Image (tube, rainbow, N blue to C red):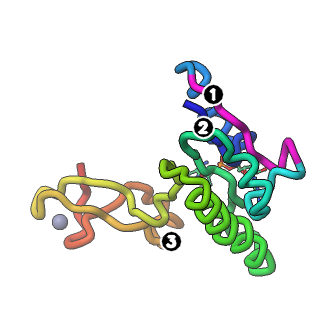
Amino acid sequence: MRVLVTGGAGFIGSHVVEALRTRGHEPVVYDVRTDPGADVRDAAAVARALAGVDAVCHQAAMVGLGNGVADAPEYVSRNDLGTAVLLAAMAQAGVGRLVLAGSMVVYGEGRYTCPRHGVVRPGPRAVADLDAGRFEPRCPVCGAELS
Ligand SMILES: NC(=O)c1ccc[n+]([C@@H]2O[C@H](COP(=O)([O-])OP(=O)(O)OC[C@H]3O[C@@H](n4cnc5c(N)ncnc54)[C@H](O)[C@@H]3O)[C@@H](O)[C@H]2O)c1
Ligand SMILES: [Zn+2]
């Protein structure tokens, strides 16, 4: 399978590229770090890169929070606009398979068991907990420790 890996020169993308190669697939790296012309916001360049592609693994992004609100336009541009341009180009090219990097900031910490409430899904950890060194998520209902 030929897989376009956006952000393929980055941390996750480079491991995806290696994993694909190991399994006999054909990864195509699309990353501004290695090729200034390979920007996910460039619709024409993305369209060219999608030729013959079966699936896309989308890892291109501006990563890292807390650098100041002045970064917001660049974050939105690379992450939101970039994803939108990619999706539009995929639709145009008829490429229907996508793996999109998410973040547990969005989907929470996963599935745990509370001794009183059974299966619970705690949301993102609170800043106060992190500041106090409490890194394990607590029951969202009663605050108990979870397993
Ligand atoms: N690393 C983690 O632990 C982690 C955890 C959860 C989610 N994620 C998400 O996974 C994705 C990849 O993260 P990462 O840690 O590999 O980041 P990274 O910074 O190592 O890699 C991102 C790559 O995207 C490229 N890139 C940036 N803007 C681009 C653009 N406009 N066009 C083309 N390429 C562009 C960069 O050059 C870089 O190589 C991000 O969406 C990140 O939020 C990462
Ligand atoms: Zn509970």
Q: Nearer the viewer, residue 107 or 17?
A: 17
Split into quadrants, the picture shows ligand 2 in the one at bottom left
Q: Residue at x 64, y 70 (%)?
A: 80
Q: Left of 64 or right of it: where is 71?
A: right
| Residue matched to label 2 | 3
Residue 50 in percent (x, y) is at: 67, 47
Under tag 1, what secondary structure? Answer: strand
Any mark on residue 127, and which?
3
Q: Quadrant of residue 26?
A: top right
Relative height, residue 78 to residue 26 (above, below):
below
Q: Amino acid at mark 1?
A: Glu
Q: Amino acid at mark 2?
A: Val
Q: Residue at x 54, y 50 (%)?
A: 95
Q: Left of 1 or right of it: where is 5?
A: right
Magenta stretch encompasses residue 74: no
Q: Which residues are magenta?
A: 25-35
| Residue matched to label 1 | 26
Q: Left of 71 or right of it: where is 51?
A: left
Q: Residue at x 72, y 70 (%)?
A: 75
Task: Check whether the beta carbons of the residues at disc 3 and disc 2 lie within 8 A of each other.
Answer: no
- Quarter holding the N terminus is top right
Q: Amino acid at mark 3?
A: Val
Magenta stretch encompasses residue 28: yes
